[in-house]
Amino acid sequence: MNRTILIEENIGETRAAVVENGRIVELHLERWSEQSGRAIEGEVYRGRVRKVEMALNAAFVDLGVGEEGFLPFGKSGRPKGMHEGAAVKVRIAREAYGEKGPNLALIAPEDGAAPECLEPAPILAQRLVRAFGDAEAVWADESDLDLDEAFDEALSPSVSIPGGGSLYIEQTRALVAIDVDADGRKAQGNAAKLSQQLNMSAAKEAARQVRLRGLGGLVAIDFVHMRAQPDRKATEQALRQAFRRDRAKVDVAPLSQFCIGELARQRRGRSLAELMMDKQGEPTIETEALRALREAASALSHSRRALVTLKAGEAVFAWLEADHIGWREAWSERLGPLPTLQRDDAAAPRAFSVRAD
């Protein structure tokens, strides 16, 4: 199997894609606005125990960044020296998401200043190369694959199934629901043959979409009904096989009599939607502002002598004008003269337009 990691360094964020056999199967995002503000998987901290919860057989640990970490004690019970105020050396086992802080793995109780980061994570590209082992990292502009298109797909509520049909994907507090719809798909043979062919394709694409979007927890897939038990079993096996290369642990249950496929996928952190969208399902102001900077930089790349004007609605303009991430300095160092930033009171708050003269 051929695996490549595409890296795109933009002003304000780094985007990455894991490509397997020519298709993007994972997307990753790291933003400047969160630098030194979140604990990253694999980092090592000397934390300070804030509370021991014997009812949970765990402790809550202050890491000095982000939310307090959750440190389970395991079957051996409370470790020696584990008490409120103690310093402990821990590794980030799972990043924070939603209202939940990171999960921690105990290395050892120890003395020293706490909280303190002892081993910061390497950059995103290095983490991904290390995680997959056999992957080669290349710049995204050396590939024919479009990262903008891939990220838009991963945020869309519906996607096409290869060969016909659609998946409708909804992330709720309790679970991720995926509905399989034929949407006019045709097949040689009878209705049973159509259902089986559609579901086999849907199982593969559903697994890809779960990985692509960084979804975790309980996932329920409503397949098109199949009467024959062998067809249900074949669809279940296709779903298992589709997750074979996933780094996250995935448990797949047999299809129910109603042809509902259930699986549990290990949460490794926030989904793309949690990173890029607000609670109303719209792109955050930061997401749109960084998109504006990408388009402005792209316009400049076609001609270094171009004069770029970026007109933005109230919200995007205010975010760019405040410059909390230092984008102006980075732009000057990388690209030269800054674009002209103008407020467009006639535009929607998160809208923008780019012009190159």
Image (cartoon, grey):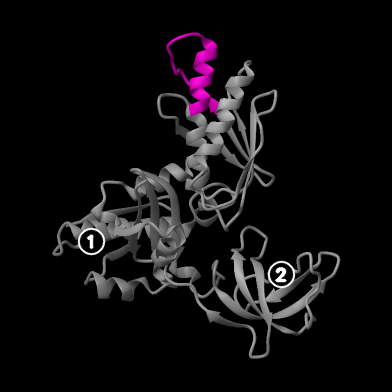
Q: Residue at x 23, y 69 (%)?
A: 335
Is 335 on the left-hand or right-hand side of 120?
left
Q: Is residue 268 above or below residue 70?
A: above
Element marked by disc 2? strand
The residue segment tinted magenta is: 180-200
Is 319 on the left-hand or right-hand side of 250?
left
Give the amino acid at mark 1: Val
Residues at circles 2 and 1 in contact by the CB criterion of under 8 Å = no
Picture coordinates of residue 162 (x, y %)? 41, 29
Residue located farthest toward the bottom when viewing the structure as drawn: 112
**Quarter of the image where the C terminus is located:** bottom left
Is residue 244 shown in magenta?
no
Is 91 on the left-hand or right-hand side of 339?
right
Q: Which residue is mark 2?
A: 71
Q: Residues within 10 Å of mark 2 (few under 14, many from 20)?
A: many
Q: Residue at x 61, y 65 (%)?
A: 93
Picture coordinates of residue 356 (x, y %)? 20, 56
Q: Is residue 211 above or below residue 119?
A: above
Picture coordinates of residue 237 (x, y %)? 56, 32
Q: Which mark is residue 308?
A: 1
The first of marks 2 and 1 along the sequence is 2
Is residue 185 shown in magenta?
yes
Q: Which mark is residue 317?
A: none
Q: Residue at x 63, y 57 (%)?
A: 98
Residue located farthest toward the right when viewing the structure as drawn: 55
- Which is closer to the viewer, label 2 or label 1? 2
Q: Decide which of 34, 350 is in the foreground and name it.
A: 34
Element marked by disc 1? strand
Is 304 on the left-hand or right-hand side of 78?
left
Looking at the rendering, which quadrant does residue 31 occupy? bottom left
Give the amino acid at mark 2: Leu
Q: Decide which of 340, 324 is in the foreground and name it.
A: 324
